[in-house]
């Protein structure tokens, strides 16, 4: 059982491999699921889950509200699909960035992963923003599935931190959770028109961690 405050990635009590979203329905030839997912991600990111209705999502894509249920049986199922897409997007970005030079210093690979995370969350993805804004405990009916998806992504950073050349006995878990917390909190205060960029922030975050270990 996961104890409170064990995880700071997005929110405490998140853990778990990534299940596919399954439906019993065969896809329609005029499948509008991608359009629905984009609209749901944008609205969940802007308003939050509770403040967004299926009617709102239907109106955003000019669809009858009842037609949305042909594609997704419930709002919870639609949220899980958005989460799955967001995790896939973030994980792909982080893997590509950290693997660009597998021979690079582990600190540089971690910095590249942080940069990819920040670029995705701060500048390009409603899906990634939903992962930070909507917490599993906010949606009890889907909480376990949402935790699985979040934990699958957090494993990317677990592996990167495990590769760092830290002193014996270093608390890697706390380091990882502090870093993920900082990365996600940047969404609250980051100014796109300001002097900082995802690249410069990633470098600064990792530099602070490295300096703390060397102190």
Image: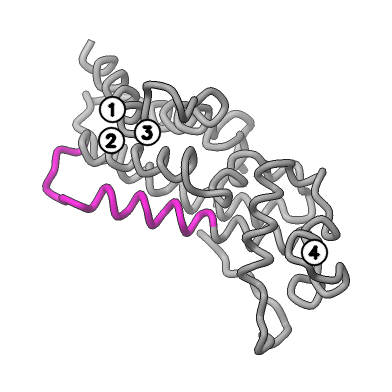
- Residue 175, given in percent of the width and then of the height, sits at 38, 27
Q: Is residue 54 left or right of residue 122?
A: right
User: Pointer 2: residues within 10 angstroms few (<14), some, or many (20+)?
Assistant: many
Kindly report the distance in space between the C-alpha atoms of the residues bearing marks 4 and 2: 40 Å
Q: Is residue 100 left or right of residue 205?
A: left
For residue 198, which numbered disc appears in the image?
3
Instruction: State the residue position of label 4.
Output: 58
Instruction: State the residue position of label 1.
Output: 203
Where are the magenta residues, as a range? 86-106
Marks 1, 3: nearer the viewer: 3
- Label 1: which secondary element: helix
Q: Earlier in the sequence, mark 3 or mark 4?
A: 4
Q: Are marks 2 and 1 in contact (CB under 8 Å)?
A: yes
Q: Earlier in the sequence, mark 2 or mark 1?
A: 2
Kindly report the distance in space between the C-alpha atoms of the residues bearing marks 2 and 1: 6 Å
Kindly report the distance in space between the C-alpha atoms of the residues bearing marks 2 and 3: 10 Å
User: Pointer 1: residues within 10 angstroms few (<14), some, or many (20+)?
Assistant: some
- Label 2: which secondary element: helix
Number of disc labels = 4
Q: Is residue 29 above or below residue 7?
A: below
């Amino acid at each position: 059982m996961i104890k409170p405050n064990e995880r700071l990635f997005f929110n405490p009590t998140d853990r778990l491999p990534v299940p596919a979203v399954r439906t019993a329905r065969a896809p329609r030839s005029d499948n509008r699921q991608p359009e629905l997912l984009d609209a749901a991600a944008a609205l969940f990111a802007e308003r939050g889950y509770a403040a967004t209705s299926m009617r709102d999502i239907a109106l955003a894509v000019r669809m009858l509200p009842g037609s949305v249920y042909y594609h997704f049986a419930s709002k919870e199922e639609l949220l899980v699909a958005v989460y799955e897409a967001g995790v896939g997007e973030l994980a792909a970005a982080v893997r590509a960035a950290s693997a660009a030079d597998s021979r690079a210093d582990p600190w540089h690979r971690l910095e590249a992963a942080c940069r990819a995370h920040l670029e995705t969350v701060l500048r390009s993805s409603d899906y990634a923003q939903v992962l930070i804004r909507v917490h599993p405990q906010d949606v009890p009916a889907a909480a376990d599935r949402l935790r699985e998806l979040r934990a699958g992504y957090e494993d990317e950073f677990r592996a990167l931190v495990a590769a760092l050349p830290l002193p014996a006995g270093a608390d890697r878990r706390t380091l990882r959770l502090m870093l993920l917390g900082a990365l996600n909190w940047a969404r609250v205060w980051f100014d796109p028109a300001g002097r900082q960029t995802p690249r410069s922030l990633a470098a600064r975050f990792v530099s602070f961690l490295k300096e703390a270990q060397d102190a």
